[in-house]
Image (cartoon, rainbow, N blue to C red):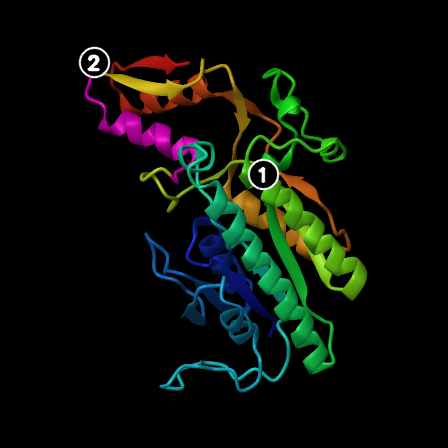
């Protein structure tokens, strides 16, 4: 039986990955600061840990004798490395969290610390076990692409080759770009078997829908649901800005295909179909069955 460690398993994409891996016959350990918000985890073993703490990362990756559980409830004693590690854990959210500038230090510090801990712990674990069999996936983001690539809403340039010269539009994007290079450096210098993908606006059931960390589809659906008939919803910008959106099951499938290939990446995981933000709002309004107008906040 293959084994997998899913970091960020309490989050939206991580929880869906756990379900898919279990369906495919894996033994799965999930790790996060919290359990999934809208669902029960199906992981064989779920551990609540803060991955900014290096000792916690060493523990969940499987160091012999490192278990701190006083009741000995770990459901599998590790005598060999995981086959696969999926690193989704990050300090992130939607535009209301990422682009205000109020959380830049936390976003960069927390996510970079997690990635450094994961790579260092895996390298040490490989050295200890005298093995190098674990594949590790890192989830980057389309936010790492240069801001000037996105100025033409009709022709956004998100080819992998367009990443440099670098100029992401947020500190979140800069951290993602740094972490991509970090994973690739550990691949070159320590032969870690890494895979890297850049996600483009993943959506689907059980995603965050309020509080500032929700993505655009959930935000639009919430606004349409909460706005009374005859009311108005606010949309940031002039509404002509375009985005591509990908359903979470397709994202998970793409990640697994990349993981089981010989290609390191980075590679885009997203849709080629572009939707303007106003079109997205209009879809949500139509589904609501209400007469709602849009107020663009420029």
Say if the magenta span includes residue 113: no
User: In front here: 135 or 151?
Assistant: 151
Q: Residues within 10 Å of mark 1 (few under 14, many from 20)?
A: many
Give the residue displayed 71% in from the left and 34% down from the top: 163
Dot 2 lies on which element?
Answer: loop
Secondary structure type for disc 1: helix
Q: What range of the chain is rendered magenta?
A: 213-229
The location of residue 216, given as percent across then percent down, is 42, 31
Circle 2: is it few (<14), some (14-19), or many (20+) Cα within 10 Å?
few
Q: Residue at x 30, y 32 (%)?
A: 222
Q: Is residue 270 visible?
A: no
Q: Quadrant of residue 43?
A: bottom left
Q: Where is mark 1, residue-wise?
A: 173
In the rendered image, which quarter contains the C terminus? top left
Residue 228 makes an appearance in the image: yes
The residue that label 2 is drawn on is 230
Residue 241: image location, x then y, percent: 52, 18
Nearer mark to the viewer, of 2 and 1: 1
Query: What is the CA distance from the residue labelled 2 to the residue labelled 1?
Result: 38 Å
């Amino acid at each position: 039986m293959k084994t997998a460690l899913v970091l960020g398993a309490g989050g939206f994409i991580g929880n869906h990955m756990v379900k898919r891996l279990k369906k495919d016959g894996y033994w799965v350990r999930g790790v996060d600061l919290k359990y999934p918000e809208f669902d029960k985890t199906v992981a064989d073993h779920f551990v609540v840990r803060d991955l900014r703490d290096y000792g916690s990362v060493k523990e969940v990756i499987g160091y012999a004798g490192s278990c701190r559980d006083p009741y000995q409830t770990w459901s599998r004693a590790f005598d060999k490395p995981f086959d696969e590690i999926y690193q989704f854990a990050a300090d992130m959210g939607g535009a209301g969290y990422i682009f205000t500038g109020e959380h830049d230090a936390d976003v960069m510090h927390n996510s970079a610390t997690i990635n450094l801990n994961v790579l260092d712990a895996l390298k040490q674990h490989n050295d200890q076990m005298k093995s190098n069999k674990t594949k590790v996936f890192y989830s980057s983001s389309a936010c790492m692409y240069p801001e000037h690539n996105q100025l033409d809403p009709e022709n956004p340039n998100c080819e992998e080759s367009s990443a440099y010269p670098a100029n992401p539009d947020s500190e979140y994007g800069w951290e993602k770009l740094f972490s991509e290079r970090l994973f690739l450096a550990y691949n070159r210098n320590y032969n870690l078997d890494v895979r890297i993908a850049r996600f483009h606006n993943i959506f689907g059931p059980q995603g965050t829908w309020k509080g500032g960390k929700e993505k655009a589809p959930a935000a639009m659906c919430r606004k349409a649901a909460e706005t009374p008939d005859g009311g108005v919803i606010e949309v940031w910008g002039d509404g002509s800005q375009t985005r591509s959106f990908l359903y979470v099951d397709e994202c998970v499938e793409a990640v697994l295909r990349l993981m089981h290939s010989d290609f390191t990446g980075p590679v885009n995981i997203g849709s080629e179909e572009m939707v303007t933000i106003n079109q997205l709002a209009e879809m949500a309004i139509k589904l609501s069955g209400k007469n709602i107008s849009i107020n663009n906040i420029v």
